[in-house]
Image: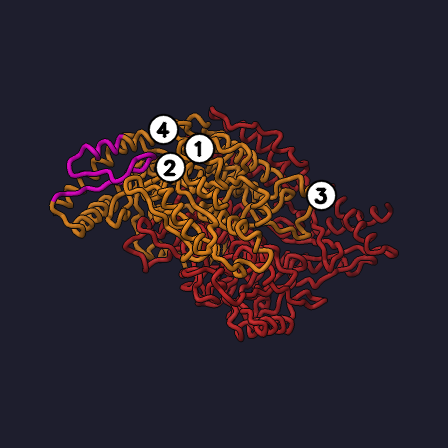
Chain colours: A red, B orange
Amino acid sequence: MGPEEFRAAGHELIDWIADYRARIPELPVQAQVGPGEVAGKLPAKAPEEAEPFARLLADLEAIVVPGVTQVQHPRYFGWFPSNATLSSALGDLATAGLGALGITWQSAPALTEVEEVVVEWLRELTALPESWKGVIQDTASTACLVALLAARERATDYSEARGGLQAESAPLTVYTTRHAHSSIPKAVALAGYGRDNLRLVGVDPVTYAMRPEALAEAVEADVAAGRRPAAVVVNVGTTGTTAVDPLAEIVPVARRYGMWVHVDAAMAGSALLLPEMRWLVDGVEGADSLCWNPHKWLGTVLDCSLLYVADPAHLIRVMSTNPSYLRSAVDGEVTQYKDWGIPLGRRFRALKLWFHLRLDGVEAIRARLRRDLDNARWLAEQVEAAPGWRVLAPVGLQTVVLRHEPAGLDADGLNRHTLAWVDSVNTSGAALVTPSLLDGVWSVRVSIGAERTERADVELLWRLLQHAAANAEAG
Amino acid sequence: MGPEEFRAAGHELIDWIADYRARIPELPVQAQVGPGEVAGKLPAKAPEEAEPFARLLADLEAIVVPGVTQVQHPRYFGWFPSNATLSSALGDLATAGLGALGITWQSAPALTEVEEVVVEWLRELTALPESWKGVIQDTASTACLVALLAARERATDYSEARGGLQAESAPLTVYTTRHAHSSIPKAVALAGYGRDNLRLVGVDPVTYAMRPEALAEAVEADVAAGRRPAAVVVNVGTTGTTAVDPLAEIVPVARRYGMWVHVDAAMAGSALLLPEMRWLVDGVEGADSLCWNPHKWLGTVLDCSLLYVADPAHLIRVMSTNPSYLRSAVDGEVTQYKDWGIPLGRRFRALKLWFHLRLDGVEAIRARLRRDLDNARWLAEQVEAAPGWRVLAPVGLQTVVLRHEPAGLDADGLNRHTLAWVDSVNTSGAALVTPSLLDGVWSVRVSIGAERTERADVELLWRLLQHAAANAEAG
């Protein structure tokens, strides 16, 4: 496809996207297709001949749109916000249009240096320590794996350069809570620690936050047994309840044993743009790494995750390679992001952050985040005040975990009731919320923060929830 | 930014990209900036107020374009092709516009099912075994790490679920050649095997391909010493010389010892679309996994790497997580790609492959690949026929490794001569080639395959190389 064909098709696609975004509020939130339905509409083989662009657009409309859950919908309250702001989408388009290749600084100096500048902008905006350096990763899952690899290598004095983890005698252990994101135990497993060496430290029964005393006890027991505590993953805004582990109290325990402290603030990190929310990471100057995802609440289109580290030289030593075909005269003077993560080839992801921050402006982004925090507090108040309803965890961020608890139901009955009314809300297409187990019982997460969610949408949701629960109760 | 502002800015950006792509041939190939130059043009802090789109476009033009090496340039012959076809860029734009969230099948059924269909289209097009299943990863580096984690877990009967690699007594070993991509030793290190347990098996001195007898000897020596051979990484199209390890002869050795066979065809995989090139992976039905990157020669915009596996159930067991908030009624009936790789959240990457194949058509893509193979053969013939010039490795793909060897130079002198004339070509901006060490001596890689590189561009390059070498020789 040449530039002129691209121009014509590109204009059509831009119009299609603008129209699509404008009519999202009229679409059902949850995807309305069953397993295999999308695949069944696609041919079994790739086309030998080029197809006209109109056919692609028609398929986008007829097959793809009904086949995705509309996370840009103002009544999307599922999982966590996954905003894809149109300002960042423009940056992403610039990335594809430029077609730059990020393998070394030399292959695309601007790819590296815009990234350096933008992650520094965000470091300053989130008040992370001045000496920390950041890098864009794809997701918090990968960032956590990278952090746990860095922790492993620090604990073993770079065993990767010798016999590997398999040559270590005393086992390394990792600590977090059972409320940690599923990517944390996954990273522990992939990094080779083994799930037997992951300690799920006890949490406070009300806040679901890690108990520092429980961490200290677990660490001491492992040390006494000849094991080597290597890392603690501190959850700032858990997926289940947005619980916040007390970083300032965890750091001294970790420091005492030389453990790596990784802060997983995948969703909550956006809140650090608000000075009044910086308490979330009190004590962060004693941590080793922190990750948060602009592709969630902040709204930089997927995938865009920030990993900050206190000691970049260590990360580089763990990750570096230097084949001859990638050497250049400026090595040593420049940042080589290939040595800050797993992939060699890197997309120019910084452009979407750059466009996002510049086209929307930080003040407007802060106002939106504050709107969402207000909406969550408002919803929590309504739920607390409604007979038979309960808020199940502190609402410190933008997620409300709730349950409708009619009298006379046993545990099984309550679970059936909850799953029934949630399902009726979600299948209606009017809104989407997420059922989730809390202390072994099904609860409902209402995660506020879609870019276009206003108070009226939260009010409507609250009516929908009450209506669905009453209907389910009536049987 | 609302849909109407996006529409206006989007049209401007589409026009800018079309114009930019049209004028790339007039731009210098190599980025023309020094360290810190791009960063120095950017403000130290993010803007509080929204900026007008015109300012972004102006910065793209003035700061970003001169700050990237133009890998879409018809005289880009560096590293490997990194084509970002405009057809795939449209698919990528659709991805950003849709803003779908891939965490489970349920979050975006179309994201999963278009991916399943498109990777199956490409499996069929590349004649990989019918039972194999594929998944899109970001890069071959990540895909190789995933493969080596799968190998590690197969060799240890899922040690990750117990004490991890650190609890294993007999060390696991991995085999490849010294011509393997730098991401292979990196993956060995990150997966915890340790670099001491990576064997660089001997290669044929002419073809630079792995010698199966040398592999067998290395494996037998390790087994005799009580070590456990876990995996061999077979290089199909090495970065240095596009050497092709003899897969059909390697598989029986690996099978004898239960080793995982991973095929790294990151660049060369595109050639498998051509029936006459299928010899590259003769014996692949005995392998366990294969990776290749549509974001290289094929031209699907970064990042897009395909990982195919013979036993998806094993990969899923290694990678799976199943927290309550991600469960749904259709679990078990659908593909959950979160369990096929490291990240949980996934971008709708399949759209760019879907658009690319449909808008360009497979026949035209095959014609382009054949054009590039022809151009490489033509260049190799010119070099072979020119006095003082030498082709240093078999030209089985689209890369020619060459050297100008004037009489009377010692080894150091030859290195200085080579680096001098290459540097003069690259800094001129007229073309870009890559200096690379081969057998410890600097050589020059000419990697043909940019989407817009025609025979005339290769002819011009050949004149430039001769001119530069003659000038350097003359001092």
Mark toward the viewer: 4 or 1: 4
Please give the name of the residue rendered at 66% of the width and 36% of the height, measured from the top-left corner: A35
Instruction: Say which amino acid is labelled 4.
Output: Arg
Give me the C-alpha separation between circle 1 and circle 3. 41 Å
Q: Is residue B297 above or below residue A276?
A: above
Q: Secondary structure at mark 2?
A: helix
Q: According to the image, label 2 marks what residue?
A: B21
Residue type at mark 2?
Arg
Task: Name the residue beneath numbered marker 3.
Answer: B329
For residue B370, the mark is: 4
- Pointer 1: what residue? A6
For label 1, the crowd category at 10 Å Cα-Cα, with few meaning under 14, some 14 to 19 and many 20 or more, is many
Residue range corresponding to the magenta coloring: B378-407
Image x and y of residue B442, in percent: 24, 48
Q: CA distance from mark 2 to mark 1?
A: 10 Å
B173 and A124: which is toward the camera: B173
Which of the pair B46/B114 is nearer the observer? B114
Quick one: label 3, few (<14), some, or many (20+) residues within 10 Å? few
- Calculate the distance from the C-alpha at mark 3 to the C-alpha at mark 2: 47 Å
